[in-house]
Image: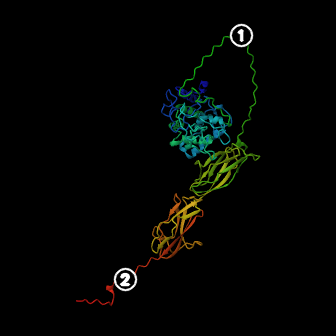
């Protein structure tokens, strides 16, 4: 039976039932606790029109690209209940081995997403199940030290012939096809879906669907979308079906998911077991029947007696052609900080420098393929760009590991970013980091006309200033407005114009003013006071931005003296009336 279930399954009328039977056999052979995929009657796929190969994928990640349909073996990788936290380099059935970089990518994605979306309960074994079915774990771990596949992994042309019909959405940028789309990378993302969900999980500044770290992080976020809780069976099924809308696909992924949950181990990159068959082989999709072959002619019965068999000669074992792979982390003797060691950013801004370390061996040579964990410690709301306080990066061929970009929060002050080698007790490389308050290097008076007022009245027109930093709008910058005695030696003024406090009293210094999203701030009403002259209002911002505004206060014009009428003039005799 094991041999029968180990073959490639044919998509069509009976495949779903066979997968369900296989998973039931897995459950029976491995003990209680296995979650079986749902039964779906006689069909292995969803009905036509529900998102199967004859319809548009409607936003699915892989769009019904070809996938491996071989089932996991019935024997358990490790004994049920055996600990899997510390994975041996090579042990157990070959099918249970996951290439080192691929396994690291799945586990890093789980760790990252659990820190930002703990309610999703993403297990890395689910990513492993999808990765196995979609690409055979990146073609058996054929990736470089940064986790990028040695050559692009492309699904078939999605032109409606045996697959979904999806016109080009990326101008061939990812899949090299400017007419139709093709699923790309070890997790088989359609380019349009990657445009929405693509991630830069290895911190190299690129969102590459052919990079296992980027693709695994994107797949995890995609599965967790819409508030799903993958610990709930209905949400788990819905997540997998959203990835590829086929019931057979769901059943196959879940069978590998259960298999990996019961134990796995790490194998060197490039040595993973690659399934031999793809479900896009001729005659294997949409229930097509294989072409029958003529039965073999019966072998004639021998007429002579068989010779007595001799004792078989034991074959001489051959030495392995490649030496066993050593964990790169074992070679590292220290992590050196590379580049800037002091990191600085304004609140709400982005750190210009990313923490970078160099892993070296005893001879001072760089060591590639080492997992380095970067961790933010201290009272801060700064996070890495992926939203986590802790991330893992892998050293490249130059031995360097680069953390993702740091995003400053609103809390100002200092904190530390530490870098350690995963699985080693070496001293950490530590970077000091500081978040300063938002700043502006320039303040300008938006309406630069001269301000005038008369004693006892308000200054005419609103007063608006704008803050910029490096020519860019500076939002959220704290301003101080103060009336001063001199532009060259500013001292607080004690008379002249003023602002009004809530109780109506005169106030000549305002603090805690904050620029708006467009960098502007409109001052409250200014009152001239009872003294004439030229007065100065000075505004300052952290970062050196300063502007001084002049206000001219004059006395009100005197009221004109009324001219007396002739009839009221004294001593002017009245005219004598004539007869």
Seen from the viewer's position, the closer of residues 275 and 166 is 166
User: Which residue is label 1 attached to?
Assistant: 305
Query: Against 527, is 135 above or below?
Result: above
Query: Percent position (x, y) of residue 258?
Result: 58, 34
User: Which residue is label 2 attached to?
Assistant: 563
Does label 1 or label 2 sit earlier along the sequence? 1
Query: Percent position (x, y) of residue 480?
Result: 54, 65
Residue 159 lies in quadrant: top right
Residue, far left: 579
Q: Indicate which disc residue 46 carries.
A: none
Query: Against 298, is 334 above or below?
Result: below
User: Can residue 35 be seen in this snapshot?
Assistant: no
Seen from the viewer's position, the closer of residues 453 and 367 is 453
User: Can residue 212 be seen in this snapshot?
Assistant: yes
How far separated are the C-alphas under marks 1 and 2? 155 Å
Residue at 52 percent of width and 58 percent of height: 518
Left or right of 78: which side holds 446?
left
């Amino acid at each position: 039976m094991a041999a029968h279930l180990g073959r490639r399954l044919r998509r069509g009328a009976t495949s779903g039932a066979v997968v369900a039977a296989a998973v039931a056999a897995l459950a029976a052979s491995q003990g209680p606790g296995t979650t079986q995929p749902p039964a779906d009657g006689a069909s292995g796929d969803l009905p036509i029109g529900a998102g199967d190969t004859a319809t548009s994928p409607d936003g699915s990640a892989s769009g019904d690209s070809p996938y491996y349909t071989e089932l996991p073996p019935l024997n358990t990788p490790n004994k049920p209940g055996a600990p899997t936290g510390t994975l041996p380099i090579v042990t157990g059935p070959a099918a249970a081995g996951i290439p080192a970089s691929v396994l690291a990518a799945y586990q890093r994605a789980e760790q990252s997403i659990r820190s930002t979306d703990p309610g999703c309960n993403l297990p890395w074994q689910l990513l492993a199940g999808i990765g196995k079915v979609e690409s055979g774990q990146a073609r058996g771990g054929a990736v470089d030290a940064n986790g990028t596949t040695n050559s692009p992994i492309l699904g078939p042309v999605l032109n409606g012939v045996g697959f979904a019909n999806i016109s080009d959405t990326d101008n061939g940028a990812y899949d090299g096809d400017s007419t139709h789309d093709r699923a790309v990378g070890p997790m088989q993302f359609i380019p349009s879906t990657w445009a929405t969900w693509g991630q830069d999980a290895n911190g190299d500044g690129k969102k590459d669907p052919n990079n296992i770290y980027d693709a695994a992080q994107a797949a995890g976020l995609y599965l967790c979308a819409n508030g799903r809780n993958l610990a709930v069976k209905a949400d788990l099924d819905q997540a997998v079906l959203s990835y590829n809308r086929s019931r057979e696909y769901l059943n196959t992924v879940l069978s590998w998911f259960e298999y990996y949950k019961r134990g796995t181990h790490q194998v060197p990159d490039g040595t993973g077991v690659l399934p031999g068959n793809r479900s896009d082989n001729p005659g294997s999709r949409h229930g097509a029947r294989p072409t029958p072959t003529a039965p073999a002619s019966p072998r004639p019965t021998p007429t002579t007696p068989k010779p007595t068999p001799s004792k078989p000669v034991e074959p001489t074992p051959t030495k392995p052609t490649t030496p066993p792979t050593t964990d790169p982390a074992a070679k590292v003797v220290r992590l050196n900080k590379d580049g800037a060691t002091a990191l600085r950013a304004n609140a709400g801004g982005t750190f210009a420098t990313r923490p970078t370390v160099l892993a070296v061996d005893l001879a001072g040579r760089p060591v590639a393929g080492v997992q380095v964990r970067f961790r933010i410690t201290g009272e801060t709301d700064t996070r890495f760009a992926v939203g986590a306080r802790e991330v893992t990066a892998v050293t490249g061929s130059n031995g360097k590991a680069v953390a993702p970009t740091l995003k400053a929060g609103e809390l100002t002050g200092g904190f530390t970013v530490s870098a350690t080698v995963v699985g080693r007790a070496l001293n950490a490389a530590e970077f000091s980091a500081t978040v300063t308050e938002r700043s502006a290097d320039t303040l300008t008076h938006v309406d630069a006309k001269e301000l005038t007022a008369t004693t006892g009245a308000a200054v005419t027109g609103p007063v608006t200033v704008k803050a910029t930093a490096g020519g860019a709008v500076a939002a959220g910058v704290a301003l101080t407005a103060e009336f001063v005695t001199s532009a060259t030696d500013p001292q607080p003024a004690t008379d002249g114009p003023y602002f009004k406090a809530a109780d109506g009293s005169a106030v000549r210094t305002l603090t805690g003013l904050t620029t708006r999203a467009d960098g502007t701030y409109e001052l409250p009403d200014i009152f001239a006071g009872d003294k004439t002259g030229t007065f100065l209002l000075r505004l300052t911002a952290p970062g050196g931005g300063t502007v001084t505004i002049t206000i001219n206060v004059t006395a009100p014009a005197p009221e004109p003296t009324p001219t007396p009428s002739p009839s009221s003039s004294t001593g002017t005799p009245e005219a004598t009336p004539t007869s």
